[in-house]
Image (spheres, grey):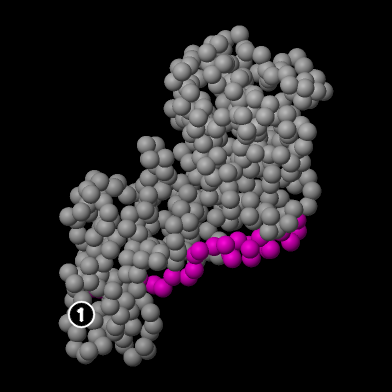
Amino acid sequence: MHTLIFELLQILFFFSESATAAPIYIATYPYDAIHSTDLSFESGDEFEFIRDNKDGWFYVRHLRTSKDGHIPKTYVELDDATPLRLAIKGRNAAETCLLKYNIPYAYLIRHAAHMGSSYALSVYQPNLRLNSLIWHYLIIVDTEKQHFYFAHEEELKNYFFKSFHELVNDPKFLRIIPLTKVISDIIDYEGEPWYISYDELKLIETIAMGEFGEVWSGQFKKEKSESVQVVVKTIKFNEPISTATFAREIQSMRHVRNHHLVTVMGVSVKPMTQETFLVTEFMVNGSLKKWLKNQPTVPDKTTIIDFVKHIICGMSHLELNNYPHRDLACRNILLGKNNKIKIANFGVSKLINDDWIPLRWASPELLDDNTKYSIKADIWAFGIVLIEMWLKGEDPYIGENASWVFRSVKNGVTHDRPTNCPETFYDNIIKRCFMKEPNARPSFVTLGKSLSDC
């Protein structure tokens, strides 16, 4: 692992879509072109720098006309407050940056990929109905009328603006999309925007001992940005892992996003010890298992079904992306504000120890062959999660040892209905998860539709 970080950064840089951006200049005075190669412009117009001619002139791109030409240096100044982050190329890079900052309605403006002279406003804008975290608004340059407009937004179809400063400071626009802060321009110039420097982390206290290492509460603070509360998980590798595999798995975890999946913010390495850390968002109410155990009685059916809907939503997204969780259990389901459910640690067991299986949550095919992880194995584990919930956080197969569980599940034994679990819920949801043949188990989407019958 001593050379892992250096190699990892090289590979992640290859995956990265970011690159150094040209400076943005803003006009302090209007100017009327004198020569055919000059550009006319108004005060407040924005320019993307191309080169310095060393003769009192810059060669630039005039953003609201998409024209390239010369402008006098004395009529413009460097725009340190620009909302443009043109170093960030494409949706994936923009989403990575916004998720890392994790601030509601944080935003950036970038070039729209493959769209010629156009831009995109990317906003951290969670939308439960549309099941999205980041929203991208296409901005077109009308070169004839020399202004910008939104191409596809009904509420903004008659809204035009001449500069991006005008856009992000317009009260009328902010009533529709309440932007908060543009992400720091520092992130533009890093080789990989989701590698987190260990100096930017502060470990506060140990909150758990996970299957693969300590779990800490902490803070992540980047220069010029607000401090964000995070969870920092020590990753202890049980066997050597190739750098390419590690990079690929982290890349996958970062790009599987949903309202009911915990956000993976990045990876960090402690320089002195080469310990590797996974940094994720903080969930204020801890694990579902702990929450259940702290309740005086089993939660009512309405509460449990609400939780189940959240879990199904998150797992349906993993199912859609063919990304097995591999360790679905109440200990890996977390509660945030207002008891919003999010699923954590998806893919972590594969990253750290590909041979490990959670015995009491394992399906029969996994007990026969621990390489047969699939979404259908997650369906079985989901059935056990429901058992945990009706047992108020107790482990499944209470009182039975590991050998009994291993032997019984392989021989077709399924978990009994907990006393407090309604028969209709057990029959319509849980039992269907315990079909021995994996392909006979329903999908998460199908299970979600079946909840109305409970």
Foreground pick, 186 / 176? 176
Asked if residue 389 lies left or right of residue 450, the reply is: right
Q: Residue at x 33, y 79 (%)?
A: 60
Quadrant for residue 378, please give it. top right
Q: How busy is the neighbourhood of tag 1: few (under 14 within 10 Å), some, or many (20 plus)?
A: some
Is 217 rendered above or below residue 289?
A: below
Q: Position of residue 358 (x, y in %)?
A: 72, 32
Query: Where in the figure is residue 192, as x and y percent of width and height?
Result: 55, 61
Quadrant where the N terminus sits is bottom right
All told, the count of numbered labels is 1
Assess whether residue 247 is covered by the magenta stretch: no
Q: Position of residue 449 (x, y in %)?
A: 46, 27
Q: Is residue 67 left or right of residue 414?
A: left
Q: Furthest-top residue in view?
A: 419
**Rendering coords of residue 40 (x, y %):** 20, 80
User: What residue is rendered at 54% in x and 45% in y?
Assistant: 321
Residue sitting at x 42%, y 40%: 131
| Residue nearest the observer in this picture, 394 or 431 | 431
Q: Is residue 121 left or right of residue 251?
A: left
Range drawn in magenta: 1-28
In the figure, 327 relative to 42: above or below?
above
Residue drawn 50% across the image and 50% down it: 100
Q: Nearer the viewer, residue 411 or 384?
A: 411
Residue 287 visible in the current orientation: no
Which residue in the rendered view is the most extreme toward the right? Answer: 403
Q: Would you name the residue on which mark 1 appears?
A: 40
Q: Is residue 22 magenta?
A: yes
Query: Amino acid under label 1?
Result: Ser
At mark 1, the secondary structure is loop
Q: Is residue 373 visible?
A: yes
